[in-house]
Amino acid sequence: MIGTSYSQTQSSVGSKIDTDANAVTTEEAEWGPDGLSGSSRSTTADTVPSSTSGHLKDGIGVFAPKTSDHSNGNTTGNSYIKTFTGDGSVSTSGWPPMNKWISFDSFWELNVGIMKQSCKNFDPSLAQNSDEENKEIRKSIEEIAAETKLDKTFIAAIMMQESNGCTRVPTTAYSHSNPGLFQSHDGTGSCHDRPSGPCPREDISQMVKDGVGGTPQGDGLKQCLEKSSIGHSAGEDEAVPYYRAARLYNSGSPSSDGDLGRKGATPCYCSDVANRLLGWTLGNSGCTSEAVLL
């Protein structure tokens, strides 16, 4: 979310778990003709990533967002693959192309267990997500994705970066309030006032609408993607505007040099989102502010 999300100031689920010892370093993992080389996949799914986060109309004549068929069906999860730096481009900065993102079904399967245990990490007094609440989150994401034409996996990745999917995530407040699953800009959707009772479906739906569709006070993912798509080259990978939209959602503005981690943004936010799109669910973030700000 624009400004600082809750996960920037408090470690998320899995913060006490050491990063997987087999995680690939920035230097080891590279995109090649056959995809990522050097990545290490684990079958132990009991560790979960810690977020370093946190946000951010139909435009006439602007790039129409593309969604991928996401043929990758990773169901075991990855450790943090590498720290991505630069402007989000695939060809020059080495960010992962959209056809390497995992499918929404795989993303959900890998992350729903994290969602079930994420609320206690924010506050031990909070009830964990129920199965019914998680089903409503998924349904709401699918509905808003169909309405806005945004990629479902990307929407879910931003949610996990902002709140780890906790329906009762606290509201942060700096220059404005950031409530709900997406820590939206002055949104109305939140269940933090229901620490133990069920989170109603209409509140879950509103949290997703606030984060993706925006609010009267600020942009959602839809508006951020439209802005980041202006001037997008037809020959450039369709993932690039999404990475740049993540920067806008987090910081509210692009950096003057186009770098996604510099000048006003949470340094590792976009790199973390990219790793989530590749299936990162094991261990802590391998990104450090120092690596991004070199």
Image (tube, rainbow, N blue to C red):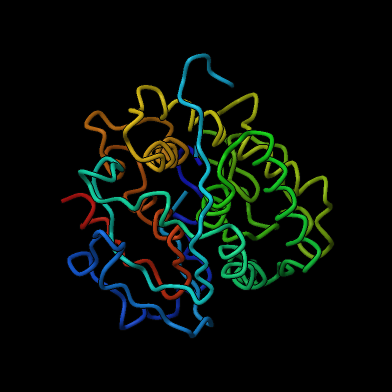
In the depicted structure, whether residue 78 falls above or below residue 253? below
| Rendering coords of residue 28 (x, y %) | 20, 69
Q: Is residue 68 left or right of residue 34?
A: right
Check the image and report above or below for 113 versus 242. Answer: below
Report the residue that reaches farthest toward the front. 33
Which residue does the image show at 28% across and 54% down from the upper left? 84
What residue is shown at x 77% (from left), y 68% (from top)? 130
- Residue 167's spot in the image, x, y percent? 70, 57
Residue placed most toward the observer, 152 or 212 = 152
Residue 183 as seen in the image, left or right of residue 136: left
Residue 294 position (above or below residue 275): above
115 left or right of 11? right
Q: Is residue 9 visible?
A: no
Asked where in the image residue 149 lies, by quadrant, the reply is: top right
For residue 105, what is the image quadrant?
bottom right
Position of residue 255 measured from the top left corner of the image (x, y, whole percent): 29, 32
Q: Residue furthest top?
A: 60
> Would residue 59 be found to the left or right of residue 105 on screen?
left
Q: Residue 274, how many percent across, how many down?
A: 40, 54
Whether residue 229 appears in this view of the structure is yes
Q: Residue at x 70, y 55 (%)?
A: 138
Q: Nearer the viewer, residue 235 or 123?
A: 235
